[in-house]
Image (cartoon, rainbow, N blue to C red):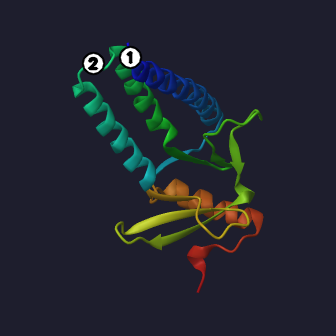
Amino acid sequence: MSTYNLVLTIAWSLWLVYEIISVARMVMTVRKCSVKVFTYDVSSIIFILMLIFVAFFSLAERGRNIITVVVMLLSILLYIPMATTVFTPQGVVAQMFKPNKDAFIPAQNISYEFRQGKLVKDMLFLYDKGRNTPARRLVIGIHDPKLITMLNENYNKYGFENPMFRS
């Protein structure tokens, strides 16, 4: 195994460990919630397609170690659940490495806005508290009636102005 393949295998392995821990925490957090809605953003879908492209050419490259390719493919498969944004009545499940027991961004720290995108007709923009730039741009799963109801209830609960009813 060349030095390049060794470094690449170690890097992908470290990323795979991070993904295993993050996905396990996300699954444990999501299982606690009775109501949940899964959505996807554009950048995550593009990133998954790029990873598949890289894996495809890594398989075609001669001299690539099979262990590196297997670790790479496992990490691509585990990135798919990490790419989801999961809404619950308590907030949004965060795929981050935080020491607290629940991986939530509380609902009172999130605002949203439905807008027309340039390439995609409808988009849901999520904003973190106090920021003017969107943290996420979601496109898949945003028309789920459970999500619309959940966001509306959170706006009423925390006293925000609902952007859907703005005149």
Residue identified by numbered label 1 = 2
**Mark 2 residue crowding within 10 angstroms, few (<14) / some (14–19) / many (20+):** few
Report the front residue among 111 and 18: 18
Query: What is the spatial separation of the Cα atoms under label 2 and label 1, in whole angstroms?
Result: 9 Å
What residue is at 69 percent from the left and 44 percent from the top? 104
Q: Quadrant of residue 94?
A: top right
Q: Is residue 61 left or right of residue 70?
A: left
Q: What amino acid type should be assigned to the residue bearing mark 1?
A: Ser
Residue identified by numbered label 2 = 63
Question: Where residue 130 sits in the image (x, y, percent)?
Answer: 73, 66
User: Dot 2 lies on which element?
Assistant: loop
Report the front residue among 143 and 80: 80
For the C terminus, give its image quadrant.
bottom right
Report the front residue among 2 and 49: 2
What residue is at 47 percent from the left and 23 percent from the top? 7
What residue is at 48 percent from the left and 50 percent from the top? 39
Q: What amino acid type should be assigned to the residue bearing mark 2?
A: Gly
Q: Quadrant of residue 97?
A: top right
Tag 2–tag 1 contact (CB < 8 Å): yes
